[in-house]
Image: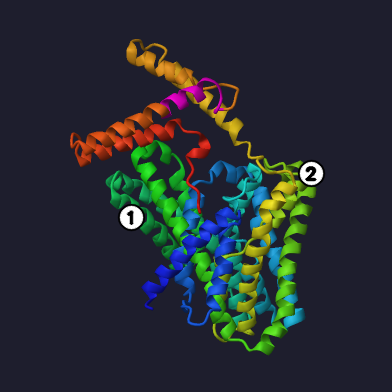
């Protein structure tokens, strides 16, 4: 089969696996990665390799932009202490522990062992976001985990670059040290500057399909520019997306925002599905380069690295929480307890960044086959072990459903309704009375699915259903044309979404 035909078959298999994962309540990254390994071991299965630099830009850039766009700058400022503890200190500690194992058990040079540690240390943004979306977790923990997944790749990639350069040159010269020192702040500044440039250009394409294309072009382009300049592409993209998101709600037309969100959600999900499936398919490439005796020798080291990463992360998270309880200034607006700490410590799924970075190692890297195998095993083990047990762990800890979003929605809706009523208090007439009645129906102090709002939604949905039937009749009778039909159908869709329950507005990922 050609590459295109193989890709179609794989995507069809992915769709079927997504339905299985939904019915078994298994996170889809876990299901797809494990299935990819099984497919790779079948004789005649397609052999699709990953080119590291292209892979990171293709799969990671959209996921970072999508996640960073929804991550408020205020949360980043408020939670910078726990974020620093996870995104920087946890990465350094994990990398150091793995480096020690690499020297002690595998005989790797110190720099090469540290490069291995940097490869396997960071939990992956795409993996964390995908798994977290399938589990109801405490909101504070989700915010911290998403913030960590946005920033820890930058720490790991900088550490990886330094270790790789030291391994190649035997020293870190002044030029390399200066370049590494500028990578993080330079990436952030570049991201902010590029965001301001794009913000100035947006009015020219706003409300057009070309605007959606430009969003993807800039996402990939920002990554490439930062990489070419030797800056951190991860931090550059995060700063870029956060800057664009500020005040975007006031500048973006509603119709364009709905369309853009739909496009990005579908595109990022498609790339995630493809990425996790392709990760599993790398098993054939990795195992084909190693003899059976070499695999047996490597098994002990690989197992030790996996256990080390899980234990070190859990220990560090619990230590930090205990320190935060003793020193309030370390909390940074986040007040976790032991149960939250266990949950955050267990959310250490590795993914695409780990595997792509391992493939980026030069051919003459010491024991490259062992390093790549270790990276692949860490990705697969964390996705399977932690991914499969995350949902039961949430329930065991009694944290299921502790999102706090229902009460927040009631409060925000009441505030907005009050603001609207105040704006209309000097207006009179039928139109003003209509809107006053509508805003006055917003509940205050009780869940949004009860009381008068529930009755209004039920009657509204009943009326809209009858309107849809009549609209179809008018099209069958050729009284309404195709263009008018689509416009009115969209109006009914928006109206139905606006009065539906919150849980009915979400599209399931699988």
- Report whether residue 371 is seen: yes
- Tag in front: 2 or 1: 1
> Horizontal and vertical percent for residue 438?
43, 20
Residue occupying image coordinates x 33% and y 34%: 468
> Where residue 77 sits: x, y (%)?
60, 44
- Find numbered disc 2 in the image and state the secondary structure of the residue it sits on: helix
275 inside magenta stretch: no
Indicate the colouring scheme: rainbow
Residue 200 to residue 457: above or below: below
Residue 475 in the image, given as x and y percentages of width and height: 23, 37
Residue at 68% of width from left, 77% of height from top? 113
- Separation of marks 2 and 1 at Cα, in angstroms: 47 Å
* Above or below, comparing residue 266 to residue 104 in the picture: above
In-image side of 259 versus 314 (left or right): left
Q: Is residue 423 visible?
A: no
Identify the element where label 1 is drawn: helix
Q: Quadrant of the N terminus?
A: bottom left
Give the numbered dot on residue 471.
none
Circle 2 sits on which residue? 325
Q: Nearer the viewer, residue 168 or 71?
A: 71
Q: From the top left corner, tell me how far across and down residue 60 is, in percent.
A: 49, 62
Residue 458 within the magenta-colored segment of the rendering: yes
Pick the residue in front: 247 or 297.
297
Left or right of residue 139, residue 192 in this image = left
Residue range corresponding to the magenta coloring:
448-461
Residue beneath disc 1: 213
Crowd rating for badge 1 (residues with CA inside 10 Å; few <14, some 14–19, many 20+): few
Count up the numbered dots: 2
Q: Are marks 2 and 1 in contact (CB under 8 Å)?
A: no
Look at the magenta stretch and give its main secondary structure: helix
> Local crowd at mark 2 within 10 Å, few (<14), some, or many (≥20)?
some
């Amino acid at each position: 089969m050609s590459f295109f035909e193989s890709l179609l078959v794989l995507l069809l298999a992915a769709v079927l696996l997504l339905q299985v994962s939904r019915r078994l309540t298994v996170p889809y990254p876990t299901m797809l990665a494990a299935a990819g390994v099984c497919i790779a071991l079948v004789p005649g299965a397609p052999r699709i390799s990953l080119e590291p630099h292209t892979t990171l830009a293709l799969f990671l850039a959209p996921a970072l932009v999508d996640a960073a766009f929804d991550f408020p700058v205020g949360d980043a400022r408020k939670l910078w202490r726990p974020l620093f503890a996870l995104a920087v200190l946890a990465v350094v500690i994990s990398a150091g522990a793995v480096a020690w194992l690499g020297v002690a058990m595998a005989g790797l040079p110190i720099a090469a062992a540290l490069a291995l540690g940097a490869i396997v240390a960071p939990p992956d943004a795409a993996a964390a976001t995908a798994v977290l979306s399938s589990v109801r977790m405490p909101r504070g923990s989700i915010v911290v985990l998403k913030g960590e997944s946005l920033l820890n790749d930058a720490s790991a990639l900088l550490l990886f670059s330094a270790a790789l350069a030291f391994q190649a040159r035997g020293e870190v010269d002044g030029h390399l040290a200066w370049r590494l020192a500028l990578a993080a702040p330079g990436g952030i500044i570049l991201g902010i500057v590029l965001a301001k440039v794009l913000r100035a250009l947006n009015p020219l394409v706003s409300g057009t399909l070309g605007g959606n294309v430009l969003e993807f072009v800039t996402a990939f382009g920002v990554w490439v520019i930062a990489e070419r300049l030797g800056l951190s592409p991860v931090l550059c993209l995060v700063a870029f997306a956060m800057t664009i998101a500020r005040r975007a709600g006031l500048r973006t037309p509603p119709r364009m925002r709905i369309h853009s969100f739909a496009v990005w959600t579908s595109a990022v999900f498609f790339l995630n599905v493809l990425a996790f499936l392709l990760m599993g398919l790398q098993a054939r490439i990795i195992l084909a380069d190693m003899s059976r005796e070499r695999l047996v020798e490597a098994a002990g080291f690989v197992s030790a690295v996996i256990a080390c990463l899980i234990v070190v992360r859990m220990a560090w998270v619990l230590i930090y929480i205990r320190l935060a309880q003793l020193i309030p200034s370390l909390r940074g607006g986040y007040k976790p307890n032991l149960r939250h700490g266990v949950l955050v410590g267990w959310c250490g799924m590795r993914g695409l960044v780990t595997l792509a970075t391992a493939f980026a190692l030069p051919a003459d890297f010491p024991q490259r086959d062992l390093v790549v195998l270790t990276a692949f095993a860490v990705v697969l083990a964390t996705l399977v072990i932690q991914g499969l047990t995350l949902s039961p762990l949430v329930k065991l800890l009694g944290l299921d459903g502790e999102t706090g979003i229902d009460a927040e929605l009631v409060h925000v809706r009441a505030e907005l309704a009050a603001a609207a009523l105040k704006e209309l208090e000097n207006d009179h007439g039928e139109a003003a009375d209509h809107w006053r009645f509508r805003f006055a129906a917003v509940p205050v102090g009780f869940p949004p699915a009860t009381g008068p709002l529930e009755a209004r939604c039920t009657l509204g949905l009943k009326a809209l259903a009858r309107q849809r039937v009549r609209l179809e009749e008018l099209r069958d009778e050729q009284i309404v044309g195709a263009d008018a039909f689509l416009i009115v159908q969209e109006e009914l869709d928006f109206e139905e979404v606006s009065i539906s329950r919150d849980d009915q507005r979400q599209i399931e990922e699988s």
